[in-house]
Amino acid sequence: MSEQVDLNAILDRHPRRPESLLQVLREVQEAAGGIPPGVDAEIAAALNVPLARVRGVAGFYSFLSLEPSGHYRVLFSDNITDRMLGNQELMQAMCGKLWLEPGRTSEDGLASVDFTSCTGMCDQGPAILVNGWAIPRMDGGRVDQVAELVLAQRPLAEWPRELFLVEDNVRRADVLLGHGLQPGDALRAAVARGADHQVEDAANSRSWREANVAAAQGPLATLEEIKRSNLRGRGGAGFTTGFKWEACRNAQGKGRYVVCNADEGEPGTFKDRVLLNSHADLVFEGMTVCAYVIGASQGFLYLRGEYRHLLEPLRETLARRRAVGLLGKSILGQAGFDFDIEIHLGAGAYVCGEESALIESLEGKRGIPRNRPPYPVSHGYLQQPTTVNNVETFCAAALIAVQGGDWYRAIGTAKSAGTKLLSVSGDCARPGIYEYPFGTPVRQVLEDCGAERTLAVQISGPSGICISADEFDRRIAFEDLPTAGAFMVFDNSRDMFEVARNFAQFFAHESCGFCTPCRVGTSMQKEIMDKIARGQGTKYDLDQLGQLDRVLQAASHCGLGHGACNPVLDTLKRFRPAYERRLKALTFQPAFDLDSALAEARRMTGRDDAGAHIRSES
Amino acid sequence: MSDTFTLDGDEIPFESGQTVMQAALAAGHYVPHLCYHPEFRPHGSCKVCTVKVNGRFATSCTLPAQAGLNVESNIDEVNAIRRTLVQMLFAEGNHFCPTCEKSGNCVLQALGYDLGVMTAGFRHLFPDRPVDASHPDILLDFNRCILCELCVRASCEVDGKCVFALAGRGITKHLIVNSESGRLVDTEVDLADKALSVCPVGVILVKRKGFAVPIGERRYDQSPISAQALADAPREPAAPAGRPCSSCEEGS
Amino acid sequence: MSKLRVATTSLAGCFGCHTSFLDIDERLFDLLKLVEFDRTPLTDIKHCGPCDIGIVEGGICNAENVAVLREFRNNCKVLIAIGSCAVTGGLPAQRNHLDLGDCLSEVYLTEPGTSHGLIPNDPELPLPLDKVHPIHEVVKVDYFIPGCPPSGDAIWKFLTDLIAGRTPTLGHGLIKYD
């Protein structure tokens, strides 16, 4: 390890509790380029957890490593949109410049170059992370530039700032992106709602606010507006936000928590990055409104590790809000309205976007989805009532606190109120963020973003659905095409088999490994797709893909496994020739090349006669 | 009068707080399972106990029993899924039954027999998993690990030692032990530990005890695992001995 | 009714499954009323002709195994993997976590022996594959009879089911992996 790490300084920034484990490990990784030998044991002792758990957590997250990963760790985002923009070639070029092999740390410990899952820069890819810091818009020139900086061992802090410039690329704004609110507007509106509301339900008075008679009805009145708005969760599942808040508010517990899910890991999604970059006050405002409604005093923003560059700006926003009384004790002068927000950084694990896995991760553990029921609304963070919502959901809630539920539900469709942010990427002239009222047809989005000769659109990422041209009149709405926001466009030059194969690789890499079907099934699916790609596929392989799907759908522990076969099945259904033209035969073919399996023996014996080879059959 | 649900057409009574699995076993009805153990908190990772409940698939060891549920377990559709899951486990690890000390007493093997698993079906992954023979009295053969976490649960909840834990992710997930060297001999493990007696397969073995029971007299030689359901009926939770810890296990 | 033609072979196996096959004892006479043997170690026929049933013991560890297995698959309407080695790779597959080159070096070059410091390279010797495979990873296999070896009773039950046109099922006591 090239750098010494001041562990005590890191430990001093965190409570010495097991829940701090992931944050401490992340900071050690950042400071030392890995968890140095022996430091794991010191962390275990300091936080009072078994050493094996420290290693278990370190081994779970992609961005943590118990082996040195180089003074400079370069990770190429490997979403299909990055591939379409040439990330594979750029990665090879980078490895060439740095004289190293992909995935291997150089002998001198200087650098390593590898792939990582989508880093949320699809509108400005191909993107990389250098020691966790995002650099978008990679091209040959930038590869040279980064390689030279690495070889010159320039500290990251001295690298040219323009390398790290991330664009918002907002292409269409509606009520949310054009909100025009000032910090505190939504909170003031929420508190004010109490004043002109009659006392209606004494049974609900367990929340601390109701002890304050003057503002007794603010939370209930605001909850009423959220319910009236028909706001549904923007993370994809679409649970009704008002019911979630109400259930959490009514759940018994020693304390309640508000958690903002900013672990935007679904490949092709990047709208939360833009909200956090340019509308952070609105996000925190929505969280604080939620805290006001449910009676929480602690909130967490779980920020995906790929958005490391947003950490300090977000902390500054939080500090500003504290300074003007929008966070902390007695918010807006309301006695008892105490609430603050802490930012937790993820460390490279897609599954943590699942709300119960996210809570496990917040508690400093491996991000494994919990058994449910019980649900987080009653047994969340530290087993206490917890509301987990998407970044965009909190933003919408803040709007509703100001404008009211009726105003909001008038936007969109009957079953899908409001607007939706789409992260548009892939084959189109103007990739970026588009905000539309629900009910907008796919065709409209394609026109607006300048997509031509479109073959397919992947809605809501690999976990979502792939639609073909005859379905472009379908609408973005919970009742038709529900989406967390990803909108990846593929034109007719694209090979949909390779799209599905990229997604199959993604799921195999991101499966948490808890349950048998997903742990083994996603790997088997990836192997079969790789086999077909090598030209060794047969009809039997297609049958086995179907068998895997049945088992993963039926028996997986969480949504990752349930949806892990969707991309393959969707493309098999709509683009079957893309598979069939690759099949070698209708008869069985091995998954490996038999003649290559003799290569080592040929080398050792020096033989090359006919008997030293196996001819391929078919 | 207690509430009931139906399991393959039979009325199963249950008490509040019981899972479908617990109620079924208490009523003498077998539902195939692997990571479930009556003395420990249900875990729900192997998914072999998958059943169909009111037409949808669910994990019976973690699903709270409710009045009126229609649970289907012993039907072709469900057994086909269980068969594939057992096949996946055989393909994932290195399961060489002919040389395994646990053969004949192994739950994975017995499930395979009962479900009619004749082949792993999938390509065998043949992972490289070195054994840990460092301890003078205990052998760890990770080749056979199915990641059920029973040893993790027993060591934390009962022994209060947290000797075992899981590391890695996805298909690289694996069992580790709690010592700086990473070797069992340097942990707090003791021959009397509950964790040593709960492995359903042949990972945790007491040395010099192999093949003690002759072939033909081993547990699942005598009758199939499905006929031994009552032996798995709910028992009192194992008593914690040391400092209890429930936070090492996953998804709790 | 004409007799079914049956071929059997042992690849990377120990012939234990064949020995167990003989444990069907006098039922062999009943079987011979229904089948006739093509290539097997019993008949010493060297190559397999068109058959109804092929029974393969042992996994695939070298080039010759591949050739024989393909001969069976190409000539047999129904192919059965018999025994742990054919079904899972079995004991020979326990070398799979080792590098083949390291194995050959260790055996022939590093350790004392009779090879005079040479790795045998006679063209008569089949070259080993880098990994040992169960036979279903190399060809399509129709049925599997696990066991090390499966008992004579299991083999008898399986074959009589198959010959009678029933889906072969073994049931408790006959299905064994050890």
Image (cartoon, grey):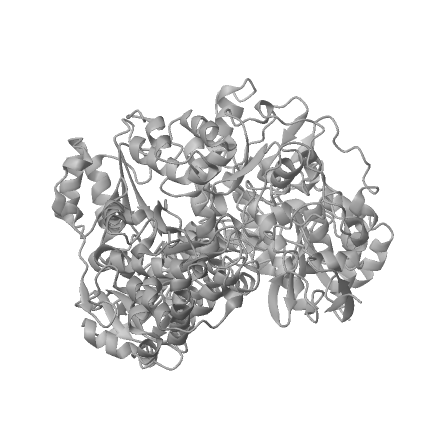
Residue A406 lies, in percent from the top left, at 34, 79
Q: Residue at x 24, y 50 (%)?
A: A317
Q: Residue C149 sits in which quadrant?
A: top right
Determine which quarter of the picture holds residue B32.
Answer: bottom right
A383 to C32, vertically: above or below: above
Who is closer to the viewer here, A269 or A170? A170
Q: Is B242 placed left or right of A207 in the picture?
A: right
User: In this image, A296 relative to B161: left or right?
Assistant: left
Q: Is residue B148 above or below residue C159?
A: above
A420 and A378: which is toward the camera: A378
Residue lying at 39% horizontally and 69% vertically, measured from the top left: A571
User: Residue B3 versus residue A78: which sits nearer the camera?
Assistant: B3
> At which x and y percent is residue A163?
15, 46
Say above or below: C27 vs A607.
below
Out of A355 and A556, give the one closest to the viewer. Answer: A355
Residue A551 seen in the figure: yes
Q: Position of residue A103 (x, y in %)?
A: 33, 39
Q: Quadrant of the N terminus of chain A?
A: top left
Question: Is any part of residue C3 visible from this angle?
Answer: no
Taking the spot 66% from the left edge, 21% from the top edge, the residue there is B136
Q: Please state the horizontal and vertical placement of residue B89, each as a whole percent of the image.
A: 59, 49
